[in-house]
Each structure stands twice: as C-alpha cells, then as structure tokens.
Image (tube, helix red, strand yellow):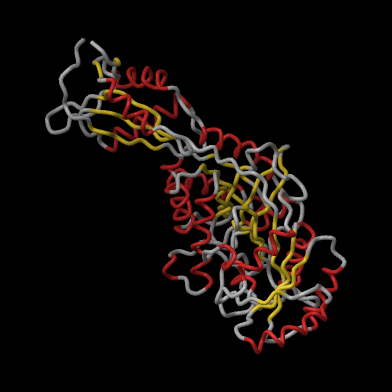
Amino acid sequence: MTGIETADGTWSDESDWEIADSIEGDESGAHLPMPTLAVVGRPNVGKSTLVNRILGRREAVVEDVPGVTRDRISYEAQWAGRKFLVQDTGGWEPDAKGLQQAVARQAELAMRTADAILLVVDATVGATSTDEAVAKTLRRSKTPVILVANKVDGERLEAEAAVLWSLGLGEPRLVSAAHGRGTGDLLDDVLDVLPETPREDLGPGTGGPRRVALVGKPNVGKSSLLNKLAGDERSVVHDVAGTTVDPVDSLVELGGKTWRFVDTAGLRRKVGNAAGAEYYASLRTKAAIEAAEVAVMLIDASVPITEQDLRVISMVVDAGRALVLAFNKWDLVDEDRREQLEREIDRETVQIRWAERVNISAHTGRAVQKLVPVMETALESWDKRIPTGRLNNWLKEVVASTPPPMRGGRLPRVLFATQATTRPPTFVLFTTGFLEAGYRRFLERRLREEFGFDGSPVRISVRVREKRERVKK
C-alpha cells in the first residue's frame, strides 16, 4: 500500500499530499529601502492631486477645502522601472499658529529628511509671500529641489508661469495635476535628481522594518502614542477629535530595531456615515490595516469598551493581522474602573483571548516600551510554521481523544492536516465530512495550547475529500 498514515490511523492517497503542497506558500515581505520625494507647498495648491497623479491611483485624500492633508504621509510609487516613496505634506504657512503651526513643522521635517523635493506653486495665483518664504528656506537646503507650477491648463498660463523664475529655484516645470499634463516629463526630471538609495539606510538588513498600524476610534491617543515612541512630533496632536485624516508613516527605533508605524485616522461607526474627506480617510485606514503586519489597537481604558472598539478589532481580525490590545489612558483608571474593565474584557473580547495585551499611558509614557516585546511575540506567532509531521502527530492524538461530532448519522474522519500559509497561520484539514464550527474552534484552542500563536489569528479550513478506494501496490 502506498500513501501516508492519517490522523485517525487509516491511509491517505499520496495525491492528497500533492494537493497540500500546491497550496503551500509564503511571502517574505521583504522591502528594500527606497529614496523619498517630498511634495511641499502652501495649502490648496494641489499637492495631494499631484501625489495621486504620480502614484497613478487615488491614495492621498483630496477635497476642495484647504488644509485637508495635515500630516506627512508616504506612498510607494514607481516610474520607468524605479521605485521610490512619495511623501505628501500639510500646507506650509510661515506665520501659522496652533494646529497649522504643527502642520508647518511636519512640512519642514519632510524637507530635512527627503532625498528630493517638489515645491508646488499655484500658477493661476503666481508667487505669493508664502511661496517666497518656502523658496528662501529651500534655497539653503542641500537637497535637490524642483519647482512645479501646477494648474497650467493652457498656453496663456504657460506665459504667466514664467514669473516663477523669480523664486530662484530654476526653471518651473509646468503641469496640470488634475489633467495629467506635463507629469510624465516631471517624473523624468525627478528620477534625474533622485538618488538610487535613500541618504540613510533606516532599515536593518534587507528585510525592511516591520509594519505596525496604530488603530482605534477617534481621539483615543494614537498620535500621542506615536510621538511618545518616536521621541518627537511625527503626528499632529490637537485636542480636537479626528485630527489625523491620512495614515502617517514613521520609522521609529525601538528595542534595537527599526519599526514602520502608521498612525491612522479614527474609524467611525460606519464608513457609509462619513462624507467627503472622512469617507476617503476611512478607506485609507482600511488600506493601512491591510498593509500592516501587526495592528496595535488602542482602547480608552478610562471609559467602557464601545461598539466602535469592537468593530475596529473585527476589522483587524478579518484582515488576518497580528493584534496587540493597548489599553491607553491607564493613568486615569482607578481601582473600581480596573475591576469593571476586567469584566468588560471577559465579556466583550472572548473571541480574541489570544490577543496580546498591555496597559499604557501615551500621555505620561507609562509602560509604552512594553509594546515592543508583545509586538515581537505577536509577529513571531504570525510568522510561525508547524512541520507537517509534528502537526499530524498532534492531530492524531486530539482526534483520538475527542472525535468530531456525528453529522447526518455519520462520523467524519479527519485524514490529515497541513499548514497552507503563514501570515496568518492557516491550516487545512482534509476530511471525509464537514466539521462543525464548534469542533473547529475546539481544534483551534488545542492548537494554540500546543503550539502557542499568542497575538496572531489562526485560520482553519476544511476540505472534504470524496470517498476513494485504497491504492494498492
């Protein structure tokens, strides 16, 4: 007889193993460091529209209201076979105060850290005092700068754009970001000045930094946590809920490693209830979760767990990402609230007992460094692969001690199992009949008891095999 002994002691045809091999696979997730192009300028000159044109897709939030982009956001772009990061920034105002002052600092930081800069000016308005102030700053920069005259939709504006030579940044490139005019030539010029690699290799090795999404409802402290971890103001923080509109990429050194954090907009109760920029920001947040490897879910520990919190958690789990629950504002939690919170956690998060948990205060910095080991544990689980032989030896013992329930008067046999993928760990069970959801949950619990997987979702699917004759020699 040829074949493999299965979990219940019978034999399986080797063709089953060929099927299992065909569904195995893994992605390394390697990302080589890329140079950064920063897009700067005063508010409402069309920076985000130009970013979208460069990307060839709608990523940056665009709305006919000045100041929609508040933080600096990085997107991956490609032109003529070369990859680079495009960093969108909030409008730069030299005399800005309050929130706008914080936005201005973001733009200035982008100028200092980028490998090349696009200064965007509205050709229909001409050079304003703000444009002149930005140009004066950029003329002192050692970073290559390209002046972009945007909204040039006809020959009349081409002649008027010539006055922008006065900014002292060389020939203005005439484009219409809305219609795509001149953007191809602009990108050719960008590649001429953009280095092949960034000025600094910020990621250790060739694997690139692990990607972390900071998620949670509005005003839960995501931006404050990012700033505390980074040790500077990476995100705009303001005492107005919903300050973050776009995801914000930040490379942060923690625990001897570089991590890529994305500070996302707070998710509303339902995307359909959002309008305009909020709607597209919600889509960007979903995309940030999809692009991340681990999500740090911030929950306000000082108030009851809400439906919004649970909805965001479900979104992370559905996306198959590793998960850390960070109960923030712990400095506001007294003994009575702690007891109440424990009861809420037992009641509301019963389906994600596997999630890593840490109590922090982004405001005071309490225990924020404890996030590093729990993120590492969650990612290790997310990446974990169990050898097929070991997996089936375990499965044989579990099925023998607790067989699956009868279905339609028949007892389903579990033939064997294989781990199809990692990220998240996904297991396929080959059986002679359907396994009830309750039994699959039982197998998941036993799987976690045996192999760990703390901080990562685990997926189990069933493939029912048709009854076949045994293959003999």
Q: Position of residue 344 (x, y in %)?
A: 47, 48
In the displayed structure, 308 sits above or below 209; it is: below
Question: Residue at the spot x=74%, y=66% of the render?
Answer: 107
Location of the C terminus (image quadrant): top left
- Farthest-out residue, bottom: 156
Find residue 109 and report its image quarter: bottom right
In the displayed structure, 468 sits above or below 126; it is: above
Question: Residue at the spot x=42%, y=36% of the render?
Answer: 458
Location of the N terminus (image quadrant): top left
Q: Is residue 289 left or right of residue 11?
A: right
Residue 144 seen in the figure: yes
Question: Residue at the spot x=48%, y=69% of the render?
Answer: 279
Q: Is residue 244 left or right of residue 443?
A: right
- Which of the two residues, 50 or 267, is positioned nearer the viewer here? 50
- Which of the two residues, 433 or 218, is positioned nearer the viewer here? 433
Q: Position of residue 318 (x, y in %)?
A: 42, 48
